């Protein structure tokens, strides 16, 4: 059911937005690029985010009473971070007191540098017979005066008396939201780091971010150590079904992968892990379950339910992640069993749910995750694409590593682009596969139904000597011992057909056609390497002008970085599952009907 949206107008900018009931004035403003001042991260403790309600309304909250004076409350002033709206509302935003630092992230998105991790230097008054407040109270009072809430635990109490006294009561408190992470001697505000991790089924990418400058200090990526347990999420889940030991094995391997990346990051940037306070991690639902040691079996069975979908803020020590021992790990929410936190991060990075443009974002992999929409309405789905795009179950398929053919051009001869440069090709990776099929179509060697021509059928064709048979199956020879078979073409047709159908179903539900699409965004570790023209020729994406098909890179990692650098962006991510409507494809009759029609390749005059 679609909730009725409310209109919020911000004066004096005359900027308006439509949001679901229950959205705060603070978040809604951020969605439309109108940052309201804050130092507490929207927790209702700094009092900096106040706005004046002119029309409509917002209830007075406990935080309002604490932070605002009675006359202000009467005048309609509210803390925008606490003010949830349930009716159309107009407010005035006072002039910003400061211009926050910003960094460009994701797909040309400007992100305010406003991390959830804050370092606050405080000079506490020393205890005396007249002032016998406890150490904890002393610290809390000082932080409250600066506008911060603080929750401490036993671990801090054990060290607090010594740290305070050794440091002459001049300390830096490190907060993750309102959780105390550490108390460091002296003024340590300059050194503050976090890590953004894109936990992919195949590849894991970690970026060490400087939370003071917003810059990446180091990036590392490696294969997910779970690879020996299967290439896709279903085989990983099946391995986990063998019992607790197998589950522990999956968890241990992925932790080892992440912690190895971390130690490499620390070394290459010369940053101590004790200055790394937070990790934001995104991945599909299965990867997050396996990382946390949570049974993922129900994800693989009807009706496909994850154990959790909410964002989690967990102690790094409990998860087993090697950052500051008092640090935290933040996961982003998942939308459904097959539309995970990586896609939520992708939607953030592309700004798809915040702009007027009608766009479709496709993350191509063994599962094609598709998001379609604009600020007005967003739909998403997951289409099972099979392993073709990852290069597996393709006769000469391989991962996108050295020796893989990643690009192909056919004219009167064959031109190959091989990863690693001028070396002997060993196989074809996903992008090479898509290119080959597209080029075969253009060269007239593959018909609209996907049937490959034989040498006998086109004896005059300049490439006819490349048409061979392997074990009785037609094939096209790309290089010595590397060829594409008729069966491979069928695999690709299945994969692209599934994704193309997913896109079509979403477009039908939204009531838009290809002509209405402003942009088609190809993302994910595979999608970004696809040649947009080839994607269009094989009919993977709708037939829009080529300049409207964009490769957008590792959007999951970019979204994770955004959530690390800006608590506001993190909030946006938390709210996305409520904003995005999930469309289940299985069981839809239009899915099956369209599927048959999109297995074919488009006619060339349509895509050229
Ligand atoms: S009180 Fe700090 S952001 Fe609202």
Image: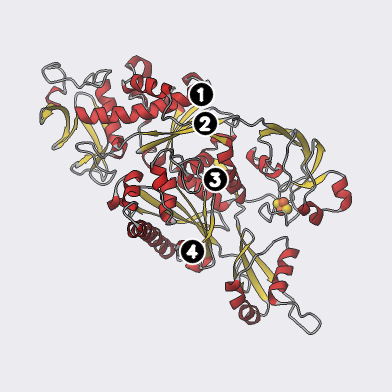
Is label 1 or label 3 in front? 1
Instruction: Name above or below for residue 406 compared with residue 514.
Output: below
Q: Identify residue for label 3.
A: 104
Q: Which comes before the other along the chain, label 4 or label 2? A: 4
Estimate the x, y position of residue 576 in percent, counting from the top left: 57, 40
Q: For this rendering, which residue is in front, 447 or 60?
A: 60
Estimate the x, y position of residue 196 in percent, counting from the top left: 48, 53
Where's the N terminus, which quadrant? Answer: top right
Q: Identify residue for label 1.
A: 509
Marks 4/1 in contact by CB < 8 Å: the verdict is: no
Q: Which comes before the other along the chain, label 3 or label 2? A: 3
Q: Which comes before the other along the chain, label 4 or label 3? A: 3
Q: Identify residue for label 2.
A: 379
Q: CA distance from mark 4 to mark 1?
A: 43 Å
Q: For this rendering, which residue is in front, 586 or 266?
A: 586
Q: For this rendering, which residue is in front, 265 or 249?
A: 249
Marks 1/2 in contact by CB < 8 Å: the verdict is: yes
Is label 4 or label 3 in front? 4
User: Please, what secondary structure does the residue beneath circle 1 have?
Assistant: helix
Estimate the x, y position of residue 457 in percent, counting from the top left: 14, 16
Q: Identify residue for label 4.
A: 318
Residue 103 seen in the figure:
yes
User: Please, what secondary structure does the residue beneath circle 4 have?
Assistant: helix
Q: CA distance from mark 1 to mark 3?
A: 33 Å
């Amino acid at each position: 059911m679609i909730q009725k949206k409310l209109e919020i107008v911000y004066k004096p900018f005359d900027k308006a937005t439509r949001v679901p009931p229950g959205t705060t004035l603070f978040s809604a403003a951020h969605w439309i690029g109108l940052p309201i001042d804050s130092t507490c991260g929207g927790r209702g403790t700094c009092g900096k985010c106040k706005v004046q309600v002119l029309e409509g309304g917002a209830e007075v909250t406990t935080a309002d009473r604490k932070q605002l004076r009675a006359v202000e409350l009467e005048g309609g002033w509210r803390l925008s971070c606490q003010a949830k709206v349930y009716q159309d509302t107009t407010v005035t935003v006072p002039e910003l007191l400061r211009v926050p630092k910003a960094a460009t992230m994701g797909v040309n998105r400007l992100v305010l540098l406003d991390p959830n991790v804050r370092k606050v230097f405080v000079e506490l008054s020393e205890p005396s017979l007249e002032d016998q407040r406890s150490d904890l109270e002393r610290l809390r009072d000082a932080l409250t005066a600066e506008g911060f809430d603080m929750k401490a635990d036993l671990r801090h109490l054990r060290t607090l008396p010594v740290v305070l006294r050794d440091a002459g009561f001049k300390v830096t408190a490190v907060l993750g939201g309102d959780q105390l992470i550490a108390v460091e001697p002296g003024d340590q505000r300059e050194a503050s780091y976090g890590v953004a991790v894109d936990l992919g089924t195949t590849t894991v990418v970690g970026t060490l971010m400087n939370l003071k400058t917003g810059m990446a200090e180091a990036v590392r990526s490696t294969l997910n150590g779970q690879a020996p347990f299967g290439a896709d999420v279903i085989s990983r889940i099946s391995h986990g079904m063998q019992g607790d030991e197998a589950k522990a094995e999956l968890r241990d391997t992925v932790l080892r992968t992440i912690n190895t990346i971390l130690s490499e990051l620390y070394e290459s940037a010369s940053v101590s892990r004790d200055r790394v306070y937070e990790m934001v991690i995104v991945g599909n639902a299965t990867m997050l379950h396996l990382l946390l040691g949570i049974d993922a079996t129900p994800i693989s069975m009807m009706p496909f339910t994850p154990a959790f979908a909410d964002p989690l803020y967990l102690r790094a020590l409990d998860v087993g992640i090697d950052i500051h021992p008092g640090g935290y790990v933040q996961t982003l929410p998942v939308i459904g069993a097959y539309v995970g936190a990586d896609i939520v991060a992708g939607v953030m990075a592309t700004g798809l749910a915040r702009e007027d443009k009608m766009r479709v974002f496709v993350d191509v992999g063994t599962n094609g995750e598709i998001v379609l929409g604009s600020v007005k309405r967003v739909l998403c789905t997951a289409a099972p694409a099979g392993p073709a795009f990852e290069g597996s179950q393709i006769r000469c398929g391989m991962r996108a590593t050295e020796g893989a053919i990643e690009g192909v051009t056919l004219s009167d001869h064959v031109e190959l682009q091989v990863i690693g440069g001028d070396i002997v090709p060993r196989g074809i990776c996903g992008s090479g596969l898509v290119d080959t099929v597209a080029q075969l179509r253009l060269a007239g060697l593959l018909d609209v139904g996907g049937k490959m021509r034989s040498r006998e059928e086109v004896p005059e064709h300049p490439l006819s000597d490349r048409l061979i048979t392997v074990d009785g199956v037609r094939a096209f020879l790309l290089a010595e011992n590397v060829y594409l078979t008729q069966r491979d073409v069928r695999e690709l047709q299945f994969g692209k057909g599934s994704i193309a159908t997913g896109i079509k179903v979403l477009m039908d539900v939204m009531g838009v056609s290809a002509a209405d699409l402003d942009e088609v965004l190809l993302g994910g570790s595979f999608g970004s390497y696809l040649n947009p023209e080839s994607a269009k020729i094989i009919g993977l994406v709708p037939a829009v002008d080529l300049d409207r098909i964009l490769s957008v890179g590792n959007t999951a990692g970019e979204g994770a970085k955004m959530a690390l650098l800006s608590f506001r962006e993190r909030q946006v991510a938390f709210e996305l599952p409520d904003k995005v409507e999930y469309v289940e494809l299985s069981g839809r009759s239009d899915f099956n009907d369209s599927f048959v029609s999109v297995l074919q390749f488009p006619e060339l005059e349509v895509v050229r």
